[in-house]
Image: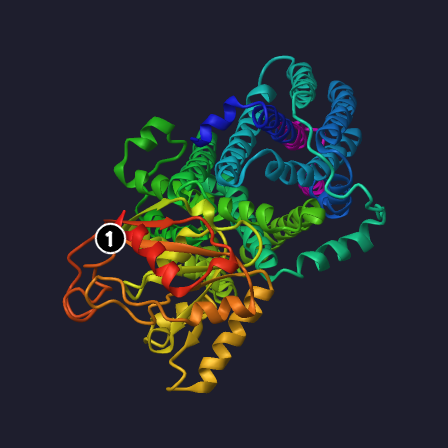
Amino acid sequence: MNQFSLLGTKRFLPFFITQGLGAFNDNLFKNVLLLFIAFSGLYTQESSTTLINLAAGLFILPFFLLSPIGGQLADKYEKSALIRKIKLAEMVITSVGAVALWFNFVPCLLVVLFLMGAQSALFGPVKFSLMPQHLVEEELVGGNAIVEMGTFVAILGGTVAAGLLFSVEHSMLWIAISVLALSMMGYLASRSIPHAKANDSTLSVNWNPFSQLVKTIRNARKNKTIFLSILAISWFWFVGATYLTQLPHFARDYLGGNPQLVTLLLTVFSIGIAIGSLICEKLSGGKIELGIIPIGACGISVFGIDLYFACQQVAVETNIAVLAFLAVSENIRLLVDLALVSAFGGVFVVPLNALIQQRSEAKIRAQTIAANNVMNALFMVLSAATAVLLLNVFDFTILELFLTVSIVNALVAIYVFSQVHEFLLRFVIWLLSHTVYRINHKDLDNIPEQGAAVLVCNHVSYVDALLIAGSCRRPVRFVMDKEIANIPLVKFFFKWAKTIPICAQGKSPKIYKQAFDKISEELAAGEIVCIFPEGKLTKTGELNEFKKGIEKIISRNPVPVVPLGLKGVWGSFFSHCKGRAFTTLPTRFWSKIEIVADKAIAPDDVSANHLQKKVQALIAS
């Protein structure tokens, strides 16, 4: 299914419209209030600046206070009904806001802005925890991509609409009507969201926002991969908030000061994120592909740094028109860099969001997402504080701020990837499968989705384990010849993949025993273990005799065994086709290979001879 096909389904479209209208309305109201404070003439410049900062703080504060409570509510109650209640609250809040707009009563508008932030904080956990219930795993990346795209288009639309409506005659009347209409439309759309059962109806809600905030973060930290993914997503919002906040000042100081250029830059940035998000579906092949996360991180830094140098060549004049600005070729490079920074940001963040939804414990999924929302808000506040520090205290220019963020982004990425080896491992696998090989899969749904199992496969090349790991949806523990597992450079990836080294019993009884003990331990923990029963790479392309080790494994842990066949790998740079691997330059790129799985064999029917016949039949088919 194409990701856009989701927009034609009732399980996704009403939800998508509901969340998009909410994001649009939030940004319309917030930016109208900021414009009113700045340009109404009711306040001095100093008072205006104070109120604008107060307004920004009031909108973000509920995400700290209420996200943990929202996470509990989203786990405890049925989600579609909870969304409708939140949207009804939005209608009440915007009704008060419409009256306050009509009377230009700023204190009330500030209260309304806080309340709109509050309903958004409550909506966030239920929004993202609902998606795994209405989408199958293959749709999660595409669904998140469309939501990410819709969110940033809505943010841009609300921001632009605020500027347009603020400048028309009877502006406050039209704005009041707009925010009321948008909230009503959001509620009506929410009525069509399908039922999504509670994750844990027995949950006792802790209404203390401070103690629950601590508990929420503590729970998220229990899973290292999830918590570091949350930090990585929060860093994305740090980078995004830095760019979005500083673009108006950037246009003023570097691009001639025409307000229309601010809209152009915001549009380019938002469209870049939307395109990057949508590209994820193509890059990931419809599954949650962690291998593209390093690509996103690298792109943010590379094009962020190039943006600094591109701006040295910008040719503008005071109040230059948009068309005149676009007519200068040097200026296009700036816009392309800005678009690519945001596009790679989309590639970076979408798989991380899907990962959190997929791997979070079902009972506390919404609370985990609430922890993500809290950290996102914290990093956006840190973004503002960092900008103030660097620009006002250390006298950085805006360009130097952008350059610093790009360099720090590379350091953050190196730290995250050094802590979660799975990201780099998947990146190597993704590169293999998109350069050297084209990998087709057949019947891999025979591999159990849960519980322990052993995969047995023919052994053709030094990268067989990486090819299988990239094709299997579950993490796989590979049993591999000690000599192969210790090949320089490659051994780091095998170590990160938690490979179990083994050798002949005669060579090292200790290593042999340790290997079987580790295999038993992994199977007892419900993991997937893959072995190559030939015990060595084929040097002829033909299947070698299967050793009896598989029978010993199953005698200790009676689990299903799934035969696999690797086809098309013989003859590649990593095989012994021409005598020895790695001895000649690669001559085959993007060659077609296939991984085929047979039905699982019950433990009682497992024998080395029977499995060899099964694998032989797979590779001969």
In this rendering, is residue 489 above or below 587?
A: below
Q: Residues within 10 Å of mark 1 (few under 14, many from 20)?
A: some
Q: Kindly identify the amino acid type of the residue bearing the numbered disc 1.
A: Gly
Decide if residue 409 is on the left or right side of residue 199.
left
According to the picture, the residue beneath numbered tag 1 turns out to be 568
Q: In this view of the protein, can residue 130 be seen by the observer?
A: yes
Quadrant of residue 199 within the rendered picture: top right
Q: Position of residue 425 (x, y in %)?
A: 42, 61
Q: Does residue 36 belong to the magenta stretch?
A: yes
Q: Give the residue at x 38% y 59%.
A: 610
Residue toward you, 525 or 552:
552
What range is drawn magenta here? 28-57
Q: Position of residue 265 (x, y in %)?
A: 44, 36
Decide if residue 601 is on the left or right side of residue 387.
left
Q: Position of residue 61 (x, y in %)?
A: 73, 45
Of helix, strand and loop, which one carries label 1?
Answer: loop
In this rendering, is residue 62 above or below 478?
A: above
Q: In this view of the protein, can residue 305 be seen by the observer?
A: no
In this rendering, is residue 32 above or below 399?
A: above
Residue toward you, 595 or 66:
595
